[in-house]
Amino acid sequence: MRTRRRTTPIRVGDVIVGGDAPVSVQSMAKTDTRDIESTTRQINDLGNAGCQIVRLAVPDLEAASALGAIRNRVAVPIVADIHFDYRLAIAAIGAGVAALRLNPGNISRREHLRKIVSRARERDIPIRIGVNSGSLPHDYRSGERLAERMVSVAMEQVHMLEEMDFHLIKVSLKAPDVLTTVEAYRLIADRIPYPLHMGVTGAGPPFTGAVRSTLGIGLLLSMGIGDTIRVSLSGDPGLEVDAGREILGSLHLIDPGASVISCPTCGRTSLDIPGIASRVSGRLRSVRQPIRVAIMGCVVNGPGECRDADVGIAGGDNKVLVYRAGVFSHSVPPQDAYDAISAEIDLLLGIRSNETPQDTR
Ligand code: SF4
């Protein structure tokens, strides 16, 4: 891992983005913002999953006018995603959002942009310039590679804000192609002091999207680039948060909380390792204590992994070996494997069996 690029920190609600602050995880609600109940519920669910910033689409004044009520019912800072209509930005700021995502070039009249900037400055609200490869101006200079074009467009937008002496800026440069995304962020990282919001856009359904996002975001983070991340998936936004936290945890940039180690299985096991691992992962999803649970199919690698875990199970001959604090504790019949590891987790977390939380997925 390279030393992290030092950026000028900004504040999104109570989350510092950039500077020495840990890389944060964000997502975007997929509800209709005008539906206050559903949107509030989804934001709170995302917050419980570890999401630190949530963006909301604000396509019209009705959505903008819902922001105040939503904001009062959630703890996670809200970013209003605005395009074209400056009145929506003014209304969102008035509703108390923590930041805007807005491309200055989308606001057709300069005096309207000035109004937005003036209100944002009054409230100390940052603006993210979010350039996506799919929405570049058609008349842009030909001959430039896509990543260069994205950077040129972003720089123009940055200069529009800087000319108004506004510097609470964050920038993103997203494309569906991983290498284009990586190149764009690398190019701009040397040219601006502002924090970078990173992600691969249009990354696809959960499996494909998670792989592409992990590659793109992971490569950049390993180069020391990036201050906040969003994994974009065509699917449950909770998975975006899980994937984002897993990326940061895998690079030791955050303590990811509970983690599950499970083997890929082979012909040596008769245990349903995927099923058990999936149930255990679901149970531990909101656990923030740094516990390590091993779910292993047999005694080839099982005891070794269990020794490095807080609790673990390893398949054996018609039995399952249960480990506690790295030491063999007892064995149970194979059909009791999940109950056995679940009981060990309860013990570790200090949960009595009648208070055991339900699986969340
Ligand atoms: S731990 Fe055992 S069952 Fe699991 S992959 Fe390794 S050899 Fe196969």
Image (cartoon, helix red, strand yellow):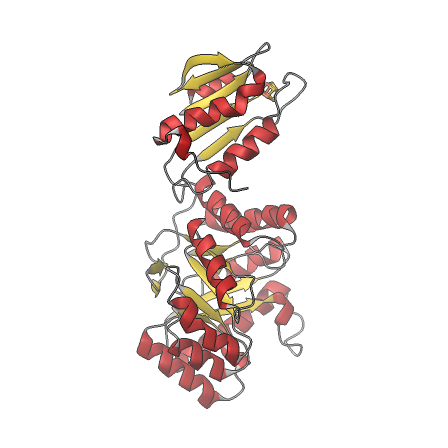
Q: Is residue 57 above or below residue 348?
A: below
198 horizontally vs 203: left or right = left
In the picture, measured across the screen, residue 202 lies left or right of residue 255, that is right
Residue 308 left/right relative to 103: left
- Count of numbered circles on the image: 0
- Which quadrant of the figure contains the C terminus? top right
| Rendered position, 148 above or below 355 | below
Quarter of the image containing the N terminus?
top left
Nearer the observer, 361 or 190: 361
Image region (quadrant) for ligand 1? top right
Between residue 104 and residue 261, name the one nearer to us: 261
Residue found at the far top of this picture: 317
Q: Residue at x 37, y 67 (%)?
A: 72
Query: Taking the image as drawn, is residue 298 in sight?
Result: no
98 relative to 292, above or below: below
Residue 33: x percent and y percent?
52, 69
Q: How far across and how far down the image is residue 166, in percent?
A: 37, 77
Question: Can I make out residue 122 in this image?
Answer: yes
Residue in the picture at 55% in, 75% down: 59
Q: Position of residue 178 (x, y in %)?
A: 61, 53
Vertical relation: 160 (above or below) 169: below
Q: Which residue is painted at 40% across and 73% down in the image?
A: 68
